[in-house]
Amino acid sequence: MGGDPVPIGRRVAYLRVRRRLSQQSFADRLGKSKSWVDKVERGVRSLERVSTIRDIAAVLRVDASALLGRDVQPHGVAEQREGIARIRAALSAYEMAFGRPTDREVMSPDCLAREVRHAWMTYQHARYPRLVELLPMLVTEVHRAHALNPKVGRAAVVVEAYRVTAALLVKLGEGSLAWLAADRAMSAAGDPVLLACAAVQLGQVLRASARAGPVMLAAASQIAPGKPEELSLRGSLLVQAALIAARAGDDRVVGELLDQAAELAAQVGDGHDHHRTAFGPTAVELARVAAAVELGDGPQAVARHEEAIGRDGWRWLPIEHRAAHLIDAARAYIQADDPANAARVLLRAERLAPAEIRDRPAVRDVVAQAARDPDAPPTITQLGIGLGVL
């Protein structure tokens, strides 16, 4: 880890509060004075004796390594890894390819569709640990339904099941597995609309690849402007292409594509979620923030962020979308040399959607950068320690 570590006193204070111990009760258990504890936590008194550190760790019921900030593993990491392994196993099952008979009744299409809708709702509420539990069964049922009736394999419910799987895996930093799910969605798409739906997630997966931009634009070109549903898909693909261009540093293309997306968004309006895109004028403005961050223009990103969250459409976006944007805003504030506001929006994101902060590996570096600032509020320091990044 880069940067200066958080002083051990801050760690002691955080872990003491987490154990719900007052300074006095903590001091009593250590056989020290309350004043001694206060000085340690404020950094006035250093902790150098190994025996003292071990005594403190024993009272706090943690390993000394956790107290010292070494090899701290965030809560839930083991469970998440196990869940991802189950999702991988489900995606790797090829019973449908060999026509293996099923040993129990296959879920009906209507029931499968309800489960997919529930999975999307769980995702959009940023309940990622719960979705990790749901997806292995859902993917397995999709495979079994296809084994019974191959026509199901090209139905919208299959595409949507793979889309939500890819979306979650991107969040969890499982790029290769997310690509597999997105590719499955693309392969299952039986018409231009479903192909465009799948391409939205493919764009998220391949955002670091400049070669993915033309794929987004090709998929968008297959959708004729018409109903709000089609406009939302076309606009979302333009947004994905713009973010890919931003990652490549092409600010001219970024501006052109987002301007085109804004024209479509104006026809759709805010407050809709066609094809699980949440596309509208506010979503495009948030994309401008994300693009500015990718281009390294923190001040512009901050200005656009502060304007965007004042729009009525901000409140209508899914929780996941808003929380993800706040993380982009934190990056913008860090680029603008304003770690205090970066900490503020990160804490706001954590209150809004805890899993967006706690379950996304990519977010931990942002938290660490904000928390290491000398003037960082204690709450962001506590969050950083809890995530194991300090």
Image (tube, grey):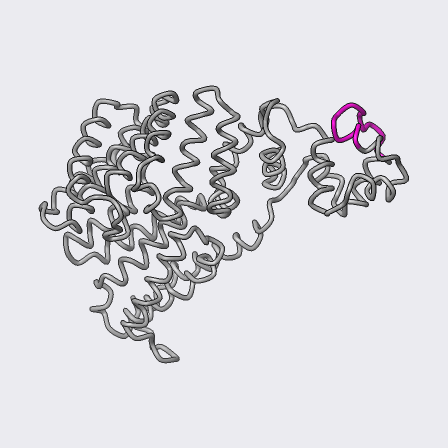
Relative placement, left or right, of 85 versus 165 is right
Q: Image point 58% across, 52% down: which residue?
A: 78
Q: Split into 4 quadrants, where in the image is the N terminus? A: top right
On the question of residue 219 being in view, the answer is: no
Relative placement, left or right, of 225 versus 368 is left
> Is 49 in the magenta?
yes
Q: Image point 58% across, 25% down: which residue?
A: 2
Rendered image quadrant of residue 260? top left
The answer to whether 325 is drawn above or below residue 373 in the figure is below
> Which sits in the foreground, 295 or 32?
32
> Which sits in the foreground, 103 or 249?
249
The answer to whether 138 is drawn above or below residue 170 in the figure is below
Instruction: Give percent across and percent down for residue 109.
Output: 27, 72
The answer to whether 209 is drawn above or below residue 84 in the figure is above
Q: Split into 4 quadrants, where in the image is the C terminus? A: top right
Rendered image quadrant of residue 300? top left
Relative placement, left or right, of 4 versus 24 is left
Relative placement, left or right, of 379 versus 343 is right
- Number of disc labels: 0
Q: Which residues are the magenta region? A: 38-50
Instruction: Give percent across and percent down for residue 283.
Output: 28, 39
Instruction: Give percent across and percent down for residue 10.
Output: 70, 32
> Which sits in the foreground, 61 or 88?
61
Instruction: Give percent across and percent down for residue 208.
Output: 34, 34
> Which sits in the foreground, 336 or 222?
336
On the question of residue 355 being in view, the answer is: yes
Q: Image point 38% across, 66% down: which residue?
A: 140
